[in-house]
Amino acid sequence: MENALQKSETLAVNHYTFHTSQYLSRGWEIFKEQAGLFIGFSVLATCILAMASFIPFANMFLSAPLMAGFYLVARKIDLGQPIEFNDFFSGFNFFLQLLLLSVVTGIFIGLGFICLVIPGIYLAVAYTFGSPLILFGKLEFWDAMEASRKVVTNNWFNIFGFLIINMFIVLGGILLLGIGIFVAYPWVACATYAAFADVFKLNENEEPEDDILDHLVIE
Protein backbone atom coordinates (compact mmCIF):
# COMPACT_ATOMS: atom_id res chain seq x y z
CA MET A 1 0.00 0.00 0.00
CA GLU A 2 1.38 3.39 -1.02
CA ASN A 3 1.23 6.16 1.54
CA ALA A 4 0.30 9.71 0.64
CA LEU A 5 3.87 10.92 0.10
CA GLN A 6 4.73 7.98 -2.12
CA LYS A 7 1.54 8.47 -4.11
CA SER A 8 2.20 12.19 -4.55
CA GLU A 9 5.73 11.54 -5.80
CA THR A 10 4.34 9.15 -8.40
CA LEU A 11 1.65 11.61 -9.50
CA ALA A 12 4.18 14.44 -9.68
CA VAL A 13 6.17 12.73 -12.43
CA ASN A 14 3.56 10.62 -14.24
CA HIS A 15 0.78 12.12 -16.32
CA TYR A 16 -2.75 11.78 -14.95
CA THR A 17 -6.04 12.81 -16.51
CA PHE A 18 -8.15 15.44 -14.78
CA HIS A 19 -11.90 15.09 -15.53
CA THR A 20 -13.45 18.45 -14.62
CA SER A 21 -17.01 17.67 -15.75
CA GLN A 22 -16.90 14.30 -14.01
CA TYR A 23 -15.90 15.90 -10.71
CA LEU A 24 -18.59 18.56 -10.91
CA SER A 25 -21.17 15.87 -11.66
CA ARG A 26 -19.96 13.59 -8.86
CA GLY A 27 -19.81 16.54 -6.48
CA TRP A 28 -23.44 17.34 -7.25
CA GLU A 29 -24.45 13.71 -6.66
CA ILE A 30 -22.71 13.70 -3.28
CA PHE A 31 -24.32 17.00 -2.34
CA LYS A 32 -27.79 15.75 -3.27
CA GLU A 33 -27.41 12.71 -1.00
CA GLN A 34 -27.54 14.99 2.05
CA ALA A 35 -28.58 18.34 0.60
CA GLY A 36 -30.48 19.38 3.70
CA LEU A 37 -27.52 18.76 6.00
CA PHE A 38 -25.08 20.45 3.62
CA ILE A 39 -27.28 23.54 3.33
CA GLY A 40 -27.93 23.62 7.06
CA PHE A 41 -24.24 23.43 7.86
CA SER A 42 -23.44 26.09 5.24
CA VAL A 43 -25.91 28.46 6.91
CA LEU A 44 -24.55 27.66 10.38
CA ALA A 45 -20.90 28.00 9.30
CA THR A 46 -21.66 31.35 7.66
CA CYS A 47 -23.29 32.58 10.87
CA ILE A 48 -20.36 31.35 12.96
CA LEU A 49 -17.82 33.09 10.73
CA ALA A 50 -19.93 36.26 10.63
CA MET A 51 -20.00 36.43 14.43
CA ALA A 52 -16.33 35.51 14.66
CA SER A 53 -15.43 38.41 12.36
CA PHE A 54 -15.89 40.73 15.35
CA ILE A 55 -13.06 38.91 17.16
CA PRO A 56 -9.53 39.55 15.82
CA PHE A 57 -8.09 36.53 14.00
CA ALA A 58 -11.03 34.30 14.98
CA ASN A 59 -11.95 33.54 11.36
CA MET A 60 -8.40 32.38 10.72
CA PHE A 61 -8.83 29.73 13.42
CA LEU A 62 -12.31 28.62 12.34
CA SER A 63 -12.49 28.72 8.56
CA ALA A 64 -10.12 25.82 7.76
CA PRO A 65 -11.68 23.20 10.09
CA LEU A 66 -15.19 24.26 9.06
CA MET A 67 -14.26 23.84 5.41
CA ALA A 68 -12.72 20.47 6.22
CA GLY A 69 -16.12 19.35 7.46
CA PHE A 70 -17.46 19.42 3.90
CA TYR A 71 -14.67 17.12 2.73
CA LEU A 72 -15.09 14.66 5.60
CA VAL A 73 -18.84 14.37 5.12
CA ALA A 74 -18.39 14.03 1.35
CA ARG A 75 -16.01 11.15 2.05
CA LYS A 76 -18.51 9.35 4.26
CA ILE A 77 -21.22 9.76 1.63
CA ASP A 78 -18.81 8.46 -1.01
CA LEU A 79 -18.30 5.34 1.12
CA GLY A 80 -22.03 4.92 1.71
CA GLN A 81 -21.69 5.51 5.45
CA PRO A 82 -24.40 7.08 7.65
CA ILE A 83 -24.10 10.81 8.27
CA GLU A 84 -24.77 12.82 11.40
CA PHE A 85 -24.73 16.61 11.56
CA ASN A 86 -21.88 16.50 14.07
CA ASP A 87 -19.69 14.97 11.35
CA PHE A 88 -19.36 18.42 9.80
CA PHE A 89 -17.36 19.51 12.84
CA SER A 90 -14.88 16.62 12.59
CA GLY A 91 -12.42 18.96 10.90
CA PHE A 92 -11.58 20.28 14.37
CA ASN A 93 -9.90 16.92 15.03
CA PHE A 94 -7.21 18.19 12.62
CA PHE A 95 -7.25 21.74 13.96
CA LEU A 96 -3.53 22.43 14.42
CA GLN A 97 -2.35 21.08 11.07
CA LEU A 98 -5.20 22.78 9.19
CA LEU A 99 -4.47 26.07 10.96
CA LEU A 100 -0.76 25.88 10.12
CA LEU A 101 -1.64 25.01 6.53
CA SER A 102 -3.99 27.99 6.28
CA VAL A 103 -1.51 30.44 7.80
CA VAL A 104 1.59 29.32 5.90
CA THR A 105 -0.10 28.95 2.51
CA GLY A 106 -1.77 32.33 3.06
CA ILE A 107 1.62 33.93 3.66
CA PHE A 108 3.21 32.26 0.64
CA ILE A 109 0.31 33.11 -1.65
CA GLY A 110 0.29 36.70 -0.40
CA LEU A 111 4.01 37.04 -1.05
CA GLY A 112 3.47 35.47 -4.46
CA PHE A 113 0.93 38.12 -5.39
CA ILE A 114 3.32 40.83 -4.27
CA CYS A 115 5.92 39.28 -6.60
CA LEU A 116 4.23 40.22 -9.88
CA VAL A 117 0.92 38.36 -9.15
CA ILE A 118 1.66 35.27 -11.26
CA PRO A 119 3.52 33.37 -8.49
CA GLY A 120 0.53 34.00 -6.21
CA ILE A 121 -1.90 32.58 -8.75
CA TYR A 122 0.35 29.57 -9.24
CA LEU A 123 0.53 28.83 -5.51
CA ALA A 124 -3.19 29.44 -4.91
CA VAL A 125 -3.91 26.65 -7.39
CA ALA A 126 -0.98 24.47 -6.35
CA TYR A 127 -2.17 24.14 -2.75
CA THR A 128 -5.66 22.94 -3.77
CA PHE A 129 -5.18 19.47 -2.30
CA GLY A 130 -3.44 20.58 0.90
CA SER A 131 -6.39 20.10 3.24
CA PRO A 132 -7.50 16.72 1.80
CA LEU A 133 -3.93 15.45 2.15
CA ILE A 134 -4.04 16.32 5.85
CA LEU A 135 -7.49 14.78 6.29
CA PHE A 136 -7.11 11.63 4.22
CA GLY A 137 -3.36 11.23 3.82
CA LYS A 138 -2.47 11.85 7.48
CA LEU A 139 0.22 14.32 6.44
CA GLU A 140 1.49 17.24 8.47
CA PHE A 141 0.92 20.68 6.98
CA TRP A 142 4.31 21.18 5.28
CA ASP A 143 4.31 17.74 3.68
CA ALA A 144 0.72 18.30 2.56
CA MET A 145 1.66 21.65 1.01
CA GLU A 146 4.59 20.20 -0.89
CA ALA A 147 2.74 17.06 -1.97
CA SER A 148 -0.18 19.14 -3.27
CA ARG A 149 2.12 21.56 -5.06
CA LYS A 150 4.01 18.80 -6.85
CA VAL A 151 0.90 16.88 -7.91
CA VAL A 152 -1.06 19.94 -9.03
CA THR A 153 1.91 21.36 -10.93
CA ASN A 154 1.87 18.25 -13.12
CA ASN A 155 -1.63 19.20 -14.33
CA TRP A 156 -1.81 22.84 -13.27
CA PHE A 157 -3.81 24.36 -16.13
CA ASN A 158 -6.60 21.79 -15.98
CA ILE A 159 -6.94 22.24 -12.22
CA PHE A 160 -6.82 26.02 -12.67
CA GLY A 161 -9.73 25.73 -15.11
CA PHE A 162 -11.62 23.57 -12.62
CA LEU A 163 -11.17 26.19 -9.89
CA ILE A 164 -12.29 28.98 -12.24
CA ILE A 165 -15.51 27.07 -12.94
CA ASN A 166 -15.98 26.58 -9.19
CA MET A 167 -15.52 30.30 -8.69
CA PHE A 168 -18.25 31.08 -11.22
CA ILE A 169 -20.57 28.58 -9.54
CA VAL A 170 -20.05 30.34 -6.22
CA LEU A 171 -20.51 33.77 -7.83
CA GLY A 172 -23.71 32.52 -9.41
CA GLY A 173 -24.91 31.44 -5.98
CA ILE A 174 -24.17 34.89 -4.59
CA LEU A 175 -26.07 36.58 -7.42
CA LEU A 176 -29.17 34.50 -6.60
CA LEU A 177 -30.01 36.92 -3.79
CA GLY A 178 -27.10 35.44 -1.86
CA ILE A 179 -29.16 32.38 -0.94
CA GLY A 180 -27.70 30.24 -3.69
CA ILE A 181 -24.32 30.34 -1.97
CA PHE A 182 -25.60 27.76 0.50
CA VAL A 183 -25.96 25.32 -2.39
CA ALA A 184 -23.02 26.47 -4.50
CA TYR A 185 -20.38 26.33 -1.78
CA PRO A 186 -21.01 22.75 -0.59
CA TRP A 187 -21.33 21.66 -4.22
CA VAL A 188 -17.88 22.94 -5.16
CA ALA A 189 -16.45 21.50 -1.92
CA CYS A 190 -17.87 18.09 -2.83
CA ALA A 191 -16.53 18.47 -6.37
CA THR A 192 -13.08 19.26 -5.00
CA TYR A 193 -13.27 16.17 -2.82
CA ALA A 194 -14.31 14.13 -5.88
CA ALA A 195 -11.32 15.47 -7.81
CA PHE A 196 -8.93 14.59 -5.00
CA ALA A 197 -10.44 11.12 -4.57
CA ASP A 198 -10.02 10.37 -8.27
CA VAL A 199 -6.55 11.82 -8.72
CA PHE A 200 -5.20 10.02 -5.66
CA LYS A 201 -7.33 6.88 -6.26
CA LEU A 202 -8.64 7.18 -2.73
CA ASN A 203 -11.22 4.44 -3.19
CA GLU A 204 -8.87 1.74 -4.42
CA ASN A 205 -9.05 -1.23 -2.06
CA GLU A 206 -11.16 0.82 0.35
CA GLU A 207 -13.29 -1.15 2.79
CA PRO A 208 -16.73 0.53 2.84
CA GLU A 209 -17.63 -0.72 6.29
CA ASP A 210 -14.73 1.09 7.94
CA ASP A 211 -15.47 4.41 9.61
CA ILE A 212 -13.59 7.06 7.65
CA LEU A 213 -13.00 9.08 10.80
CA ASP A 214 -10.97 6.14 12.14
CA HIS A 215 -9.43 5.14 8.80
CA LEU A 216 -8.23 8.31 7.13
CA VAL A 217 -5.53 7.03 4.78
CA ILE A 218 -4.86 7.07 1.07
CA GLU A 219 -4.80 3.68 -0.52
Image (cartoon, helix red, strand yellow):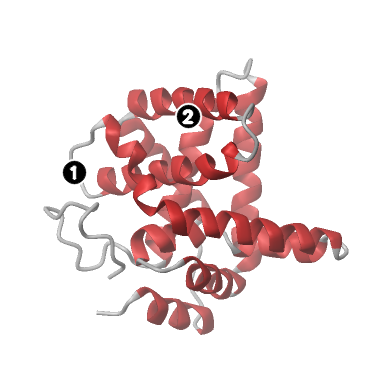
Q: Residue 181 sits in which quadrant?
A: top right
Task: Give above or below for 57 relative to 44.
Answer: below
Residue 26 visible (yes or no): no
Task: Give above or below for 38 relative to 135.
Answer: above
Q: Secondary structure at mark 1?
A: loop
Query: Residue at horizontal 57%, vertical 54%?
Result: 102
In the image, 10 versus 6, the foreground residue is: 6
Disc sitting over residue 199 in the figure: none
Q: Which residue is mark 1?
A: 81
Mark 2 belongs to which amino acid? Ala
Indicate the position of residue 152 as horizontal and vertical percent values. 57, 68
Q: Which residue is mark 2?
A: 45
Query: Residue at horizontal 44%, vertical 68%?
Result: 140
In the image, 113 versus 157, the foreground residue is: 113
Q: Residue furthest front?
A: 56
Q: How many marks?
A: 2
